[in-house]
Image (cartoon, helix red, strand yellow):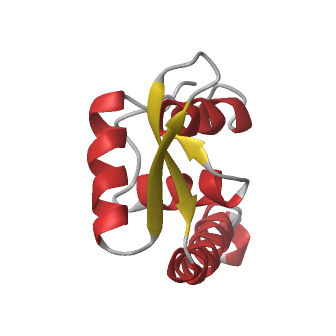
């Protein structure tokens, strides 16, 4: 099941922050890292990714500088800031709690209701 536009609001930001917590990367590299670490289950469009990167940078959650990509192209490389690390920790905790709550509901048997 390939998931793309159905991501819950705020999930894209969390995924980007997590991808950058694994090391700095350029925009397309962030997209590939998310697709690879999700084992191909999450597919992002560049049209969603780049506005999110700009927003996260404006919020001070990531920082960027220009560099050269692995194929010798000029690219903007992003890294997680201290503020971004704190936000990722918070969002990871909230996401984990949401998963636990939904799992509890889905695993409830009729005899337990």
> So how many labels did they put on this image?
0
Residue at position x 58%, y 66% in the image: 102
Image: 81 above or below 78:
below
Viewer-proximal residue among 20 and 1: 20
Q: Quadrant of the C terminus?
A: bottom right
Residue at position x 37%, y 40% in the image: 49
Residue at position x 60%, y 15% in the image: 71
Where is residue 52 shown, x and y percent of the image?
32, 52
Viewer-proximal residue among 59 and 12: 59
Image: 86 above or below 20:
below
Residue at position x 27%, y 32% in the image: 47
Where is residue 24 shown, x and y percent of the image?
63, 51
The answer to which image quadrant residue 33 occupies is: top right
Q: Quadrant of the N terminus?
A: top right
Q: In the current view of this chain or complex, which residue is farthest to the top?
A: 71
Where is residue 51 shown, x and y percent of the image?
26, 47
- Left or right: 69 with respect to 47? right
- Left or right: 77 with respect to 10? right
């Amino acid at each position: 099941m390939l998931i793309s536009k159905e991501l819950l609001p705020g999930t894209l930001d969390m995924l980007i922050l997590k991808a950058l917590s694994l090391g700095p990367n350029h925009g397309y590299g962030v997209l590939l890292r998310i697709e690879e670490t999700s084992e191909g289950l999450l597919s992002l469009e560049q049209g969603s990714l780049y506005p999110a990167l700009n927003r996260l940078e404006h919020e001070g959650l990531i920082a960027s500088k220009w560099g050269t990509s692995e194929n010798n192209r000029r690219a903007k490389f992003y890294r997680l800031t201290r503020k971004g690390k704190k936000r990722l920790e918070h969002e990871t905790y909230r996401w984990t709690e949401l998963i636990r709550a939904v799992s509890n509901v889905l695993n409830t048997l009729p005899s337990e209701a």
